[in-house]
Amino acid sequence: MNLRLTDDEAEALRARAERDGTSMQDVARAAIREYVSDRPARLRTAISRVRDEDAELLRRLAQ
């Protein structure tokens, strides 16, 4: 896989890796692992929050 970044993205990644004392590849791989593994949980949390916060609106829309 080749990942093509804009100049701004590459610089931000480079700066973050340098700040963390790691490689750009390690930072990118960590971000991918987090995104892939956490997405279902974030989605469930978001759905639950909308359901709770907008319960009255959802009830009225269902009528």
Image: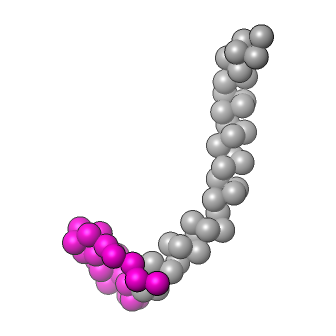
* Residue at (77, 10) in percent of width and height: 63
* Residue at (72, 48) in percent of width and height: 44
Can residue 39 be seen in the rendering of this structure? yes
Which residue is outermost to the front?
Answer: 1
Q: Nearer the viewer, residue 13 or 4?
A: 4
* Residue at (33, 76) in percent of width and height: 4
> Residue 16: x and y, percent?
34, 76
Q: Is residue 18 magenta?
A: yes
* Residue at (76, 16) in percent of width and height: 62
> Residue 9: x and y, percent?
29, 69
Q: Quadrant of residue 54?
A: top right
Q: Quadrant of residue 35?
A: bottom right
How many marks on residues? 0
> Residue 28: x and y, percent?
45, 78
Which residue is outermost to the left?
Answer: 7
Q: Main secondary structure of the magenta part?
A: helix
- Determine whether, in the image, residue 21 is placed left or right of residue 48: left
> Residue 14: x and y, percent?
30, 80
Magenta residue span: 1-24
Q: Is residue 44 magenta?
A: no
